[in-house]
Image: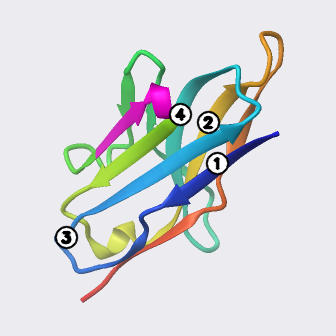
Amino acid sequence: QVQLVESGGGLVQPGGSLRLSCAASGSIFSIDTMGWYRQAPGKERELVATITTGGSTTYADSVKGRFTISRDNGKNTVYLQMNSLNPEDTTVYYCNAYVCSTRWYCEHYWGQGTQVTVSS
């Protein structure tokens, strides 16, 4: 079994910054792509950013230039640095990782979600 544990969410004023972290643990042979998604009430979960093992990144247009995704492969951890936050960024953020427990078996895992609230 694999667990993803997120941290770093909270309340921040508009224009402020937060850094989310997500650590994977458990039966891990290797981890491929890791990423962050967010989901507002009544809406579909949307991609925020992803990063491959080699460091290639993708971002949603709405966060380009403001958010930066990074990872520490040695710690099985992915980060999301969020700058210039605005109220539209308020929602629950979820970590995702494509984890191989053996050389032949891989699947996607999700964290429990962390709330980010941008408000004055």
Q: Which residues are magenta?
A: 68-76
Cα distance, mark 3 to mark 4?
27 Å
Q: Check whether the beta carbons of the residues at disc 2 and disc 1 lie within 8 A of each other.
A: yes
Cα distance, mark 2 to mark 1?
8 Å
Closest to the camera, between mark 4 and mark 2, is 4
Question: Which of marks 4 and 3 precedes in the sequence?
Answer: 3
Question: Going 49% across and 34% down the picture, which residue do you hit?
Answer: 75
Vertical position of residue 4 compared to residue 102: above or below: below
Q: Check whether the beta carbons of the residues at disc 1 and disc 3 lie within 8 A of each other.
A: no
Question: Which of marks 1 and 2 precedes in the sequence?
Answer: 1
Cα distance, mark 3 to mark 2?
27 Å
User: Disc 2 on helix, strand or loop?
Assistant: strand
Vertical position of residue 94 compared to residue 65: above or below: below
Name the residue at the top extreme. Answer: 103
Q: Check whether the beta carbons of the residues at disc 3 and disc 2 lie within 8 A of each other.
A: no
Task: Give left or right: position of 80 versus 50.
Answer: left
Q: Residue 3 in the image: x percent, y percent?
A: 71, 47
Q: Residue 82 in the image: x percent, y percent?
A: 29, 56
- Residue count near mark 3 (Cα–Cα under 10 Å), binned few <14, some 14–19, many ≥20: some
Using the image, tell me which numbered label, if any, was put on residue 16.
Answer: 3
Which three-letter amino acid code belongs to the residue tagged 3?
Gly
Question: Which of marks 4 and 1 precedes in the sequence?
Answer: 1
Question: Going 23% across and 80% down the picture, which residue do you hit?
Answer: 13
Question: Going 56% across and 49% down the picture, which residue do you hit?
Answer: 95
Question: Which of marks 2 and 4 precedes in the sequence?
Answer: 4
The one nearer the camera, 105 or 45, is: 105
The one nearer the camera, 83 or 19, is: 19
Q: Which residue is disc 2 drawn over? A: 97
Magenta stretch contains residue 72:
yes
Q: Which residue is disc 4 drawn over? A: 76
Question: Going 37% across and 21% down the picture, which residue do you hit?
Answer: 55
Vertical position of residue 9 compared to residue 57: above or below: below
